[in-house]
Image: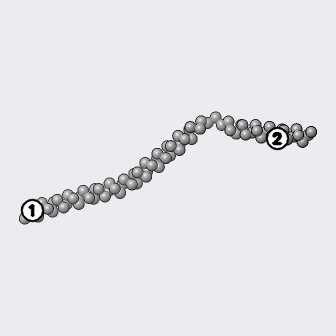
Amino acid sequence: MKKVMAGCVVGIMLVGGAFCGCSDKKEPGSAKGVVKQMTEETAKEAVNQLRTPIDKARSVAKQQEEKNKELDDAVKKQ
């Protein structure tokens, strides 16, 4: 009889502990907000790292076109 009572007490304590552990008052949506924010920051960094070389390449191409145009104009004047 004592073993049965001890088993019941231990069972009740485990179940009670599980309920206390699961009854955190934080909203589950707040964790999603943090994940979403981190995802957006990471995406922005990735986009910036991709855009920088592309912008530099466009700038160099534009400069090359301008120099080619100047050379063509100089050749036409001769």
**Circle 1: element type:** helix
Going from the N terminus, do you reach mark 2 or mark 1 first?
Answer: 2
Looking at the picture, tell me which residue is in the foreground, 11 or 26.
11
Density class for disc 2 (Cα within 10 Å; few <14, some 14-19, many ≥20) is few
- Which residue corresponds to the image point at 43% horizontal and 52% vertical from the top-left? 46
Q: In the image, residue 52 lies at what x, y percent? A: 36, 54
User: In whole angstroms, how far apart are the C-alphas of marks 2 and 1?
Assistant: 98 Å
Q: Quadrant of residue 49?
A: bottom left
What label sits on residue 56 in the rendered view? none
Q: Position of 50 compared to 59: left or right? A: right
- Graded by Cα atoms within 10 Å as few (under 14), some (14 to 19) or many (20 or more), the crowding at tag 1 reads few
In-image side of 23 versus 2 (left or right): left
Residue 51: % across, % down: 36, 53
Read off the residue under disc 1. Answer: 76
Relative vertical location of residue 26 with respect to residue 44 in this rendering, above or below: above
Q: Which residue is mark 2?
A: 10
